[in-house]
Amino acid sequence: MTILKTFGKLWLKSARRLAKVQVVEQKKLQKKLVKSLMPAVKKPRTAPRRRAASAKRAETVQAGAGTPTAARSGSGASMAAGIAAAATRLDSGGSWSRGYHVSPLADSRGRRRRMTYWLYVPHASAHGIASASAAPGQVPLLVMLHGCDQTAEDFAGGTRMNQLAARHGFAVLYPQQSASAHAQRCWPWYKRSLQHGGDEVALVAGMLEKVAALNGFDRSRVYVAGLSAGAALAQTLAVQHPRVFAAVASHSGPVYGVADSRLSAFTVMRAGSRDAGRTATRLLVERPDFPVMPILILQGGQDPVVRPVNAGQLAQQFCILNRMASTAHETPVLRAARAANDAWRRTDYKHQGRVVVRLCEVTHLAHAWSGGDASLRYNAARGPDASALLWDFFRRHRRR
């Protein structure tokens, strides 16, 4: 009996120790999952430190496809010069202004949410448009949605979209997620309320209506694009407001509408979803009047955050939404090219001779904007110029 009691005590002690270890390991795994959902987490910047943080970002060098490396050393004068140069780039060839949009609807606590945005409008140029106010209805509008851990200014600087807008005569609206809504400024694309048209989708749609009405932009040429979480939000905006947008672009974005929590979002980003096709089919059954929605999909072949499987499934979803499922099995138009220093492939899915779904796969790109300003985070110098690819695709589409 003594031996049995001793053995029993030892067994019970070991079981308790094993249970504690399992709890600790489970907590570690949960932290890893959340961290994987929110890469490069930083504490939100406060207003007094914003200028110093911007200076530090301006001095940061990105290696390859957006992996941070050590910041370059430099004097305070050189950092200030870098900030001034970045500001000059953002307003070159046009006006660069900040505004605010307040939701007309109050939440459950009686509060109305406010969101900051930046707007770029090109000046008079060779394209013959005097200004947005002088030539109402002639200036297209592009909505650009940043990714996690970015601001509107970061996104505008990294993509160089304002410089492109100055050359081609279109305006750019940059909504900015607030740090109070999400510590890393992520768009919560996996929330069902957002996917059904509420939350940030409703807020950005209302902001767009306000800006377009005030400036008289061409309502038949309104486009939306985004990076990562911003790409997911762009997809949802296009699906929820298909009569507003003439086309959408998704850069490094997850497959549409299959995640419903942070944990499931992590799974989708890593492995896509078997429900991708069914989700698109179900949406089309619920909304038989859904109009044609052209989409440009850009994806890095070496992306460790949003895996390439998402891009292929997203292309499949929009083939279904655009009633191209019966022709999706046909051999698409394949274009192989080499940009400045990286290989990429373009796949076109055509409907009645018109390219409606375009997939661009950049071989060595990780989770970053292709052909962007690599001195800013989440931008890679290598690969084709994603901004130029976006506008070349958008300019061919108009909402009739």
Image: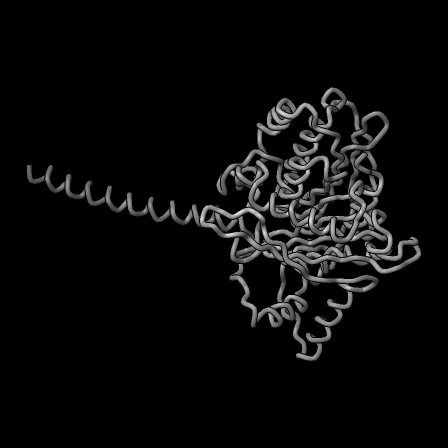
Residue 163 rendering spot, x and y as whole percentages: 81, 58
Residue at 76% x, 40% y is: 360
Residue at 69% x, 56% y is: 155
Residue at 81% x, 41% y is: 393
Q: Nearer the viewer, residue 227 or 206?
A: 206
Residue at 70% x, 25% y is: 289
Q: Is residue 286 above or below residue 361?
A: above
Looking at the rendered image, the quarter that the C terminus falls into is top right
Q: Is residue 216 above or below residue 80?
A: above
Going by the image, does 44 lie left or right of 350? left
Q: Is residue 323 above or below residue 300?
A: above
Choose top left, top right, bottom left or bottom right for residue 153.
bottom right
Looking at the rendered image, the quarter that the N terminus falls into is top left
Say how the picture is coloured. Answer: one colour
Residue 237 rendering spot, x and y as whole percentages: 65, 40
Residue 203 rendering spot, x and y as whole percentages: 61, 47
Q: Nearer the viewer, residue 383 or 136?
A: 136
Residue at the top extreme, as displayed? 326
Q: Nearer the viewer, residue 363 or 212?
A: 212
Q: How many marks?
A: 0
Q: Is residue 274 above or below residue 302?
A: above
Residue 55 rendering spot, x and y as whole percentages: 65, 71
